Amino acid sequence: MQRSAMTVRELTMHVRRLLERDETLANVWVKGEISNFKWHTSGHIYFTLKDDASQLKCVMFRTAASRLRFQPEGGMAVLVYGNVTVFDRDGVYQLYASDMEPAGIGALHLQFEQLKARLAAEGLFDEALKRRLPRLPRKVGIVTAPTGAAVRDMIAITRRRYPAMKLVIAPALVQGEEAPASLIRSLNLVARLPEVDVIIIGRGGGSLEDLWAFNSEELARAIRACPVPVVSAVGHETDFTIADFAADLRAPTPSAAAELVVPSRAELMSQVDTLRSRLIHLTRRHVERKRLQLKALAGRPVLLRPQGRLLQDRQRLDDLVRRLGFAGGQVMKRDRQKLKGLAGRLDALSPLAVLSRGYAIARGPDGRVIKEAAVVEIGDAISVMLARGELACRVESKTEVSGDGTEA
Amino acid sequence: MEQKLNFEQALERLEQVVRELEHGDLSLDTALALFQEGVALSRSCSGQLDAAESRIEKLLEQNGQPVTVPLEEP
């Protein structure tokens, strides 16, 4: 029997290949206690995971280590995720860790994900259920701890954006075992107050355990059942809770919630002002258009006694246009009645309508409308406008009427 | 005018009035009716923004009923 010896290197490679082919070892969560923890100057982390029976060498490279949201240390119970392979130089297998969480939180995390999935499947988080926030709430309910930075910040922001906004602080415990029941009680209570059009529920930043009350299923259901829109505002921007998913709107922080819920008075005022200016401008345009039509008519007066009246109407309109200009709000019912009459008369005054009834308009050589015989001389050329067409005529004789011709 | 609208309803109606004035070849009559309505709406909006009654209250429960008391600033 021939001996064919492998080199150490070959054997190590062989073992490595075996391990790397294994699906379980390719991505695995391992739980244990940290020992021999070393944070190398390179940024990599070296440690050993152990339990009563065994030990496992672990390494976490800088990129993964920099993403950790907590500070690992010796003695800490953790869950580590990664893949197992062989470190050739030492001929030892080890866990190459890409993620790690404290073991306690890991369980909570799992619970969170399961609850979230269940409520989502039930439809509790459906977009269709989300209600729009009022543009200007009459009163804002705030369910939170009555002291602390969160409530202070929200009050300060409200004061800045809309000093006269009414707030009701509904005190609640925001952490600990009693917190979910306390939050639900305050939420339900404040929702029953008249004028409360929107509610903020939340608290300032804290550890995952501190925020845990906001992951209560009962609270999520209470938020969904609330008769007015609810904005959640829990912790910091990176904290997500079940309450956030159930709420009509998630605000990243309590301050942000106040910004979202309390409108800026200045912005609303300028919005109203813009609309008002637009309203006045557009109405002026409409009236101006009609006025120009009227003016055109006045240049060709066609009724027996139209001009005085037209001028009067025009003056009234001019007057109204002027008043529209400096005080949009000054148009009273009376003016509106007047204008109503004017609008009707505009139609009646159409020159064509008059001419079609058989009237004609005579104009002198200078183009002026002739309203009395006295203004023309025998032999003058005048033009006569008919409903259809125009006649060129010469004055052969005339009869003057005594008295005021314009009043004839 | 109709019943008192809340701010949101008044603002939305005002936006609609302005849109109607922007479009459409309106009779003077209609334009002025819209104008009058718009002026009343914008007044109602401004009036609601001018309300100066600032109040911060604290919620209490009394025999199961919500009641409020003025809040001493935290």
Image (cartoon, coloured by chain):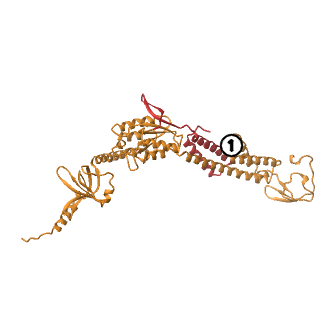
Chain colours: A orange, B red
Q: Which residue lies furthest to the left in this view?
A: A1
Q: What element carries label 1?
A: helix
Q: Is residue A382 above or below residue A129?
A: below
Q: Which residue lies furthest to the top in this view?
A: B63
**Of the residues shown, which amino acid type is indicated by label 1?**
Gln
Q: Judge left or right: residue A284 versus residue A351.
A: left
Q: Residue furthest front?
A: A41
Q: In this view, does A221 lie above or below B62?
A: below
Q: Residue tagged by mark 1?
A: A330
Q: Judge left or right: residue A8 versus residue B70.
A: left
Q: In which quarter of the image is the N terminus of chain B?
A: top right
Residue A132 in sight in this render: no
CA neighbours of label 1 inside 10 A, class few (<14), some (14 to 19), many (20+): some
Q: Mark 1 lies on which chain?
A: A
Q: In which quarter of the image is the C terminus of chain B?
A: top left
Q: Where is residue A304 in the image (x, y as percent from the top left)?
A: 83, 48
User: B13 or A87: which is nearer to us?
Assistant: A87
Q: Where is residue A237 in the image (x, y as percent from the top left)?
A: 41, 50
User: A15 or A300: which is nearer to us?
Assistant: A15
Q: Position of residue A140 (x, y in %)?
A: 48, 39
Residue A11 in sight in this render: yes
Residue A214, image quadrant = top left
Q: Position of residue A213 (x, y in %)?
A: 35, 41
Q: How many marks?
A: 1
